[in-house]
Image: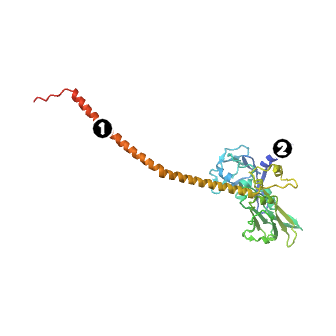
Amino acid sequence: MLPLILAAVLGLREQGACATYGIKTPDGVFSPKVEASIDEKEVTFRKIRPQDQFRSIALKLNKQNRSLANNVQLLQVIWIGESNRPGRPVPLAGPKYNPATMTFKDSMTKSVTLKIRDNSTQKLFVKKRIEDLMQLEIDDQPCISSEAFDQTNKVVTSRGQEVSISVDKTSILFNEENLSKSVMINIFNHSGRLQTVGIDPPDTGLLAYFGVNKQPAQTKIAPESWGRIPLDRDTGIFLTVIPEPDARKLARLNDKEIRVFVYEGAGQTPIRTIPIRIRVAAELRYGTEPGVLPRNNQDQEGEGIRPQGVQPRPVRPQAALTGVAVGGSWIWIFMILNLVLLIGTASYGIFFVMPRMQVLEDRLAKNEMFIHGSREAIREELEQTKKEILSRCLPPTEPEIE
């Protein structure tokens, strides 16, 4: 029971955890502005100093988050003042929203807290970070979290000198959403002088699209030069990472690392190693539906620990491909049979049914003419009979005396 309680507490803490966001001043100091937190239905931004007056606060929604983009009309904005009394909720997609850039922008002078409420049924905020949902700007300056600022400006000292190389990702997770898309890793030199880095990718599981490009010129670097890459001050490189779609290679790629080495001068021994761990979602490694793992591996996957000597058994992709090919063949055969049956039915209708319908129409026309003629003959016969009866029953008329 105690582990379950701890797990629940940690889950709630992670979902509602706060992060401090601010801007980087011209002298390179982090200036905190707001505290951001995410709950199941609300994203909250609260001023750190209530007396601050923001001429503008902008929320640029993440266009890559399709669920969020498709449910913008169901998001509401709530302003809360110093008395902690919330105002009337208003639609986010109102006059202050620019649909072209998917940006909500307004001033925040008297209000202390800004909340974005999710009124949809899609759980847009669950297990999401602020960066997954939107980009925050205050007074037209992009905001970053204090954690990202510390990571970006992390300084390593070697022989009394600062070596400042930042890597924007410490891990990568490949799932069904980004399997066919590239993941970008940015490495930047903040030291103010020439630095040398090296890239050591895994030997399996990554497509040939794995590439290294220099910033900002976008110059490609040949694989044979990845071991020693000189970086001028205020420049960087970015890595383009795409995994192999093969389930066996994905299984081997899981828990591998892309290592970034930092060298000092012409030294051959790196003074710093930055590992970037690669994780592959279980449904891709085991060939199962999302959230369904083999019974023997569910506990190990949840904790990220696997008993020694026990290796996962990925589904043989050849068998899966064979099943798909057989299913596709049956579909084609079924479509061809349907087409043949349709052509046969149309031919039968043209050559057999239509002539008989024409004969029936001719017979109906003749019957109508016969019935019409019979009706006229009966009417004439009735008129003649009427005249005879009248002539017999009525007295003869005398001629008029002149």
Residue 377: which numbered mark, if any? 1
Residue 146 in the image: above or below residue 5: below
Q: Residue furthest right?
A: 159
> As rendered, which of 374 and 43 lies closer to the eye?
374
Residue position marked by numbered label 2 in the rendering = 4
Looking at the picture, does residue 325 appear above or below residue 73?
Answer: below
* Rendered-image quadrant of the N terminus: top right
- The answer to whether residue 293 is above or below residue 367 is below
- Regarding residue 138, the answer to whether it shows in the image is no
User: Does 62 sit above or below residue 268?
Assistant: above
Q: How many other residues sit within 10 Å of disc 1, few (<14), some (14-19) or many (≥20)?
A: few
Quarter of the picture containing the C terminus is: top left
The residue positioned 87% from the left and 55% from the top of the image is 309
The first of marks 1 and 2 along the sequence is 2
* Residue toward you, 315 or 9: 315
Residue in view at x 82 percent, y 68 percent: 198
Residue 387 location, quadrant: top left
Disc 2 marks a residue whose amino acid type is Leu
What colour scheme has been applied to the protein in the rendered image?
rainbow
Q: Residue at x 14, y 28 (%)?
A: 398
Q: Residue at x 53, y 51 (%)?
A: 345
Q: Amino acid at mark 1?
A: Ala
Which label belongs to residue 66?
Answer: none
Q: Is residue 322 visible?
A: yes
Front label number (1 vs 2)? 1
